[in-house]
Each structure stands twice: as structure tokens, then as C-alpha cells.
Amino acid sequence: MRRKYYLLFMLLCFLCPALLNAQDASERILFNTGWKFHKGDLPQAEKVNLNDQKWRSLELPHDWSIEGPFSQEWASSTGYLPGGIAWYRKTFKLKPEEISAKTFIYFDGVYKNSEVWINGHYLGKRPNGYVSFQYELSKYLSKNGSNVIAVKVDHTKFADSRWYPGSGIYRNVYLIKKNPVYIPTWGLTFTTPEVRTNKTLANVVVKVENSNAKAAVVTVKSTLKDPQGKVAATAEKQLNLGAVAKGETAMDFVLNSPQLWSVDKPALYDLNVSIFIDGKKVDQQTERVGLRDIRFDANEGFFLNGQNMKMKGVCVHHDAGALGAAVPVEVWRRRLQQLKDVGCNAIRMSHYPHQDYLYDLCDEMGFLVMDEAFDEWALGKNKWIKGWNEGTPGKDGYHEYFAEWAERDLEDMILRSRNHPSIVMWSIGNEIDYPNDPYSHEILSSGRNPQIYGRGYSPTSPPASEMGDIARKLVDIVKRNDTTRPVTAALAGVVMSNFTDYPGLLDLVGYNYQEYRYAEDHKKYPKRIIYGSENGKGKNEWLAVDSNKYIFGQFLWTGFDFVGEARKWPMRSSGAGLYDMAGFPKNDFYLRQSLWTEKPMAYIMASKNDADEDMKFLWSSVPSWNWEAGAQLKIQGITNTEEAELFLNGKSLGRKKAGKLEPTLYWDVAYQPGTLVIKGYRDGKEVASYILITSTDATQITANTDRTTFDKKAKGVSMVELLLKDKDGNSVFNADQTVEVTIEGPAKLLGLESGDLASHESYQSNRRKVYRGKLLAYIQSEGKAGTIKVTFSSPGLTSKTITYKSE
């Protein structure tokens, strides 16, 4: 009898060796440390025995393009920064007890054309630089020695984008360990088919895979915990899986007195799904989810949990100036809070899937998200080389891979992110219909068409009708993977697309910069749900939303300045943002804040320009009170109060009526040094003010840091805002001195950003000129205990030291 049990045990071990070392559940390990990097191509760099000791050691995420240098030999569209080919390698060991039956490596994004090897075995290629993907390593792992992951990244076609994409493994990498029976990556689908304030019905679909050569009976248990950590609902099902088979089961939850997710109160529940075999937990997966209901109506607009509201959105790109596309989570948390300050409640992830943690932050902080897949489909768009709309463009880009990869890329984008309550619509494309870039139609010779380079029919260009055939396929892919959210796209050439099937295939139709079409198209297409998918930042653009109930929102171009989409050299970045690349607010910020927020605010700026349009004046003005004696200036005040009054050196220059939708006021002023103040009033009481003071030469560096402590067990990032001030503590707007950073202790400088769109200083340097008296420093701790001292200095200025504790 004993021999029989022994033989049975040995048979089971033979069929499933991993049972000897079975884990209690899966592990998802951040795999960013210990990488080697080589810029340039090398033959057989995937081989295990390659000597990479002289390669550069680094930690991911990493973007090699932002390391520069800036040069006119590259493309304006991608920030005059280099592309090329590079290799990454990581050597790691796993003890026998650490080896799982199923081991995967997961990349959140690699730009682009990544190819991956494990111990010399080729795993595959992914052309798209923004999508997440994984490969299984299990059968190629060494059980006693070292393992080598090698990744080749090919960004040789550097002018392949209309913005700065970055280069390299610029997002997180994870090692995922699973038992033989497991929940696969993206194997949970959470939905809320019925949402009411007193009772909500939720559903989770769980996929389970059995890699064993024998059948398995699996118990699936799911638990929902409310935001306070209290168990709100549980469910359990049994699932019979055949040998080497896949299966799924669905479970329902009834939640009484639910806490609904909204932009003001983004309540999140913890969904934990565990699977058991013979009472032993063999896998689990946890996600944060939200209970919310969305509805769009052609006449009434957008409803969240039954409440009608406007989307006050911005478009964002994924870079952060000095950091390129390898942006730490703390940086985006700061940026999202800044967007809250301007009244923003929605974000368009233009024009590709973004970093995984950014969606988590949107869930936590209460932003509605449009997730977007493509900027081009089967045909390429113009990629400007010598400046935006200058010279002859290139045509390299994603269209080269679209036919082979579009379905999988779109599907993976949805599977990866569909449990995020923040996401409320899927976009299948941005400006695919830009007139004559590449599609054309006869109407372009007569219809109203705002695009500069799209006027006039181009008979040699592909017909616009082709867009409908492609859109139909893409919409079908979305619907196969998620029916709980509408499908949309951002249309640039509505005048042309209206003569195709394209808009009619969409649930929501986004209009880029075409507010003038809202009324006539709403009348002509009464069932069409219209909104502004990309918009200018002026007052009239918002009035087109605020005054039309059927327009549910808009997305400003853009939230932040970004690298790329540059004009002629020396400009190398776009200045389209409400904030500059360092996150300092620009004049546009205050105009939008006056339109989008109720909290009293006031702001002033000055210019010699007597422009007759608010936006032209906005762009030519500065918040400075240093001018030549007697200069005749025009002062623009911005406020959301009822009245505002301007004072110069204590003397009133006049009190004027303002209004929520008439926020701009003007005064003509002869310059006198001193103090210029605007005061805003509601019900006759002062509720807001803004001051400009004439400054003398800068004498000191001041610093505002977002933190003074770090966790010694984890790396963290601190952002330090530097301002140059005079002897009286007044900010010096025109200061342009160079500031140097020195660090003592377990930390390093990640980068310095001034916000200057034309600066060609190296982002790898510890020195940078301030711009308009400001500079932002990114300090990263090393995850070690100790005291960190960061000193900012400049010749002739009093230096500033910040002390951090890492404990």
C-alpha cells in the first residue's frame, strides 16, 4: 500500500513538477532594477555569454531619447531628439523554490519595435510602443544558474510621430509568478449593470487557466470591500476545468447603500478574487473598482450616476519635459492635482494608451477618462521635420503595422484597462479624417473647412469613404471586448466625414476645433451625440459647451506643454498647455480657472500690445511689473467675481463689472514702479486679489518642496519649485541665472526643468538656467536610510539647502 501511494506521488510530481513548490498565490514583482543598457546595435546581443560588464547600469523606466542632445538633424515633430537602436539586458537568479510553474515578464510599454529573448530563446516582437504585453518564460528558465533577459528596441525611424514618443523601456516591467492553475493577466472583468443610490448590482467574470495535464475542480471566491475596508459582498462558484484547458465563471453581487464613484467623491472598492483547489489557495488577484453609471444623450448630454454634468477636460501627452517619457508616479500625481485646481474633471489620453499608474490615479482622484488607441490607421500622416507645417513632412509611423497589429493592439488596450471606473469612453482614432492628410473628398473644395492644409479636394489622395470600412472593424473589436462604454473618435474634418459612414458608426462623435458646426449638425443629425474632443482654450470655446445642453463637454489642447510638435528650430517643444513643462501655470490657466471654478479668483498681467482679442492679448502679456518709466500699458484682469478694481500704489484705477462668462477686464495704465493690485468683489466684499510688485535684481534662491521625508525602504521623488527673488522677497520675473544642484546622501537628481520651450541645455546636467525666474528640480531617493542635503546655488545669489530624512 505504501508503495502504491509513493508511485502515485511520483506520478503527480512528473505531471506537474511545480506542485512541489506551489505558491499560496501569484506574485507580481516590480522588475525594474539591475538592468544594463547599450546605445547602438550589436550583433548577437541576445546571447547569454555576451560580456555586458561595460554596459551602462541603470534602473527602469528609462528613456534614452531625452538624454539628447537636441539637434536639427532630428525631427521637429519628435522634439529634435534622437532615435536609433538600443539594447537592454538583465541577469537574474531564481532559487529552485522560487521557480513557478508559470512565469511571465510583463512590459507596460516599450517604444518601439521591441524584441525579447530569455536565455537566448526568442520570445517575440511588439511594434506598438504604447501597448502593454507579456511573454511566458517558464520553460526557458534555468533552475540552478543565471537567467538573462535581453530586449532590443528599434526606434531607427525617429520621425515616426507627431509628438515626442521617447525611446526605450520607458515604463514599468513586472515579473509575474503563477501556479499551474491560475487567473491570467487581465483575467477579471468587473461591471455594474444596475446602479442606484440604495442598491447596486455588480458582476465579475473570472477567467481561469489550467496548464496541468489533468482536470481540476476549482473553487472561485470573490470579495468586495468598501472604501473603509469593510466586506460589502461575497460570492463563490465552482468551476470544472479539463486538462490543459481554459474556463470562466460569472458572479453577481448585491450591494445595499453603495458608495458610488464620482468626480467629487471617487469611492473605490477592493475586489479580491481567489481560486482554491482542495481548500488550498493557488492564485489570487486584486483590483480597485468603482460603482458608477454613465449615460450619454443626444439632447441632454452626459449623466454620471443620474446627475447631468459637463466634462471639463484636457488632453495630455505622456512626457514631463526633463524626464521624457519615463515619468515617476509622483510627478503625475502633482500634475493631476494641478488640473483639479483649474477645475478640470476629465482627461483625454491623447493619442495612445498611457502609463498604467496614470489610470489608477484618475480612479483615485476622480477624473473621467477618454482612452484613445490610434493617431493613424492604414495610411500615414504628415510628420514635420523642419518645424510644424514647414517644409516637406515625413510619413513614417504606426500605419506600417496597422494591418497586422491593430486588432490585437486595440483589444489589449481595452482588456488592460476596462476595470477602471474613470474610463468612460474608448476612442478608436484621432484626426484620422484630417483633410488631405491623408484622405480627401470633393466637399473640401466648397464646404467650410478650418484646416490650413486641408483646403481643396485632392483627387490623387485616397477617398474618405475608406475610413468607414476601417472604423466598422475597429468598432466591432471594441464591442466584442466591452459593451459598457461608448465608442468615439476625434474628428478633424467633419465637413468631409459627414459624407462617409464614419460618424454614424460611432456612439459619440468628437469634434476637434469645430464649435461652429455644433448647432447645424445637431439639427441635421438629431441622434448624434456631439462633444468637443479637442479645443482651444478661449472663452468662446467654453461658451459653445456651457450654452448648449446637448454638448456634454470639451477637452482643451493641452493640460501641459510637451516635448515635440515643435515649430522651427530653436523651438523644440509645444507651448499649448495651461501649464508649462515644469508645471508652472501660464496665463491660459487663469482664464480657464475663471470659467471652470466657483472659488473666487483674480489675476492680472500687462502688455504693450493693444490686441483686440482676449486670447491674442493673453499670449502676449506677462505677469510682471518691471517696465521702462512712463510706458503705456494695457492691463488685463481675469476674475470670476462680480466686480474687480485695479490699484496702482494704493490709488484706484477704476472698478468694473465682471461676470462668470465675461471674465476679462481691461485698464489702460501709464507705468509707475511699485505695486499693482487687482481685487475681486462678491456682494460688495473683497474675496480675491492678485499682486504684481516691481522687483530689483535677484539676490536669493528660495525653494518650496512637496516633502521632507522619504521611506528608506522605497525610492521616492520630491519636486522642488525654485524661485529667484530680490532682497525684499519679491519674485524676479526676468531672472535667468544658472542654478547648480549638489546632493549629499542617498539620493540623486533626476532632472531640472525650466519650462523654456527653446532651451537646448542638457537634461543630464546638474545645472540649468531659470526661465522667468523659476525652475523645477526632481530629486529621487535611493531607498536607503540617511540624511539627504540638496543645495541650490548660483554665483552672486544666496544659496538654499533642503534637508530630507530617509527613515
Image (tube, helix red, strand yellow):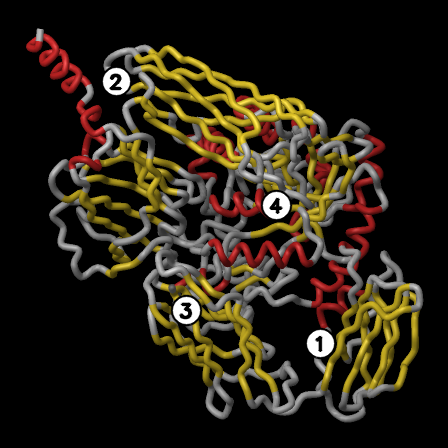
Q: Which residue is mark 2?
A: 212
Mark 4 residue type: Arg
In which quadrant of the rendered view does residue 807 lie? bottom left
Mark 2 residue type: Asn
Q: Closest to the observer: 91 or 522?
A: 91
Q: Is residue 428 visible?
A: no
Secondary structure, mark 4, is strand
Q: Quadrant of the N terminus?
A: top left
- Front tag of 1 and 2: 2
Calculate the distance from the C-alpha at mark 3 to the C-alpha at mark 2: 50 Å
Secondary structure, mark 3, is strand
| Residue drawn at (66%, 46%) of the image | 346
Q: Which residue is mark 4?
A: 348
How many other residues sit within 10 Å of disc 2, few (<14), some (14-19) or many (≥20)? many
| Residue drawn at (42%, 21%) of the image | 207
Q: Position of residue 744 (x, y in %)?
A: 35, 76
